[in-house]
Image: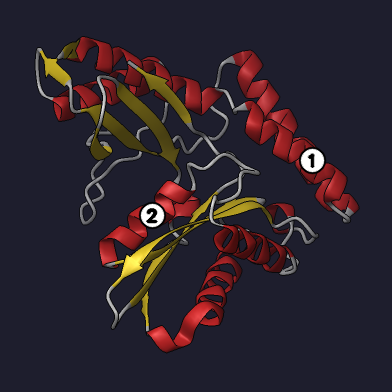
Amino acid sequence: MREVHVDDIISALEGLFIDANINLSDNVFDALEKAIEEEASPVGKEVLRELIKNANIAKEEKIPICQDTGLAVTFIEVGQDVHIYGGGLIDAVNEGVRRAYKKGYLRKSCCDPFSRKNTGDNTPAIIHTKIVPGERVKIVVLPKGGGSENYGEVRMLVPSQGKEGMKSFVLEMVTKGGPNPCPPIIVGVGIGGNFETSALLSKEALMVPLGKRNEDPSIAALELELLEEINRSGIGPQGYGGTLTALDAHVKMMPCHIASFPVAVNIQCHAHRIKEAII
């Protein structure tokens, strides 16, 4: 049994959320640079150059990539041979978020749904936990802005709608979003399970590195089909028109009930902020 003190978790979360909001990962930089080569529109190319310039300024001046520093979405895998001591895990995550958003001068966007009163420290975080084999704690943070999150949806399709119905739904959500999610976007699609697991699968799909395909060849082919059709929409970088509306599309799938066909779409903006640490 390995012991992990909550202070280690708090420190990790504090550093990760600051890092994620300031330093765009190399994987995303590479995808944006590749997009310039692939984009046919001169205006679209210039927009992509501006996005890269913006990310470089954020990195150099240690300021947020975007003014919307997101809700604090956190995925934590806890090894079953780990004993967390010194406090509760959920409290530790929220304290890490609280410190990050204060120390990093990150905008606090968490508020009461009706009164719209801000909670003041960007907590409570959105926390997803899994118990896994081993004796380590893996933390992945995904600060998620409202502009892209607003164009996500879960839809309980009927089985007869099949793959074409699913693709039509994905394209409907991309078209509905238009320029608002700040394209070029990343599209996460969750298929199967039930109402809530399809939504979680779509969020987890956003955590897949850009350019990496699903291990299932049929799902990998579906990802490429979706990406091609999304990019035929003509929305283009920041909605100015062009051939690059999405940097990538990822699909995660699991079995579902014979009477159901749940599908969820979760869209991410070009500022795809994701960082991880292992304790």
Q: Which mark is residue 208?
A: none
Q: Decide if residue 182 is in sight here.
A: no
**Mark 2 residue crowding within 10 angstroms, few (<14) / some (14–19) / many (20+):** many
Residue 155 image point, x, y percent: 37, 74
Picture layout, residue 194 above or below residue 275: below
- Residue extending furthest toward the bottom: 160
Residue 68 image point, x, y percent: 47, 38
Q: Which mark is residue 34?
A: 1
Q: Residue at x 75, y 68 (%)?
A: 232
Residue depth check, mark 1 versus mark 2: number of the one nearer the observer: 2
- Classify residue 203 as left or right of residue 185: left
Q: Which residue is mark 2?
A: 201
Amino acid under label 2? Answer: Leu
Q: Residue at x 48, y 82 (%)?
A: 162
- State the SS at label 2: helix
Q: Residue 257, located in which quarter of the rendered image?
A: bottom left
Q: Decide if residue 243 is in sight here.
A: yes
- Classify residue 43 as left or right of residue 52: right
Residue 96 image point, x, y percent: 28, 21
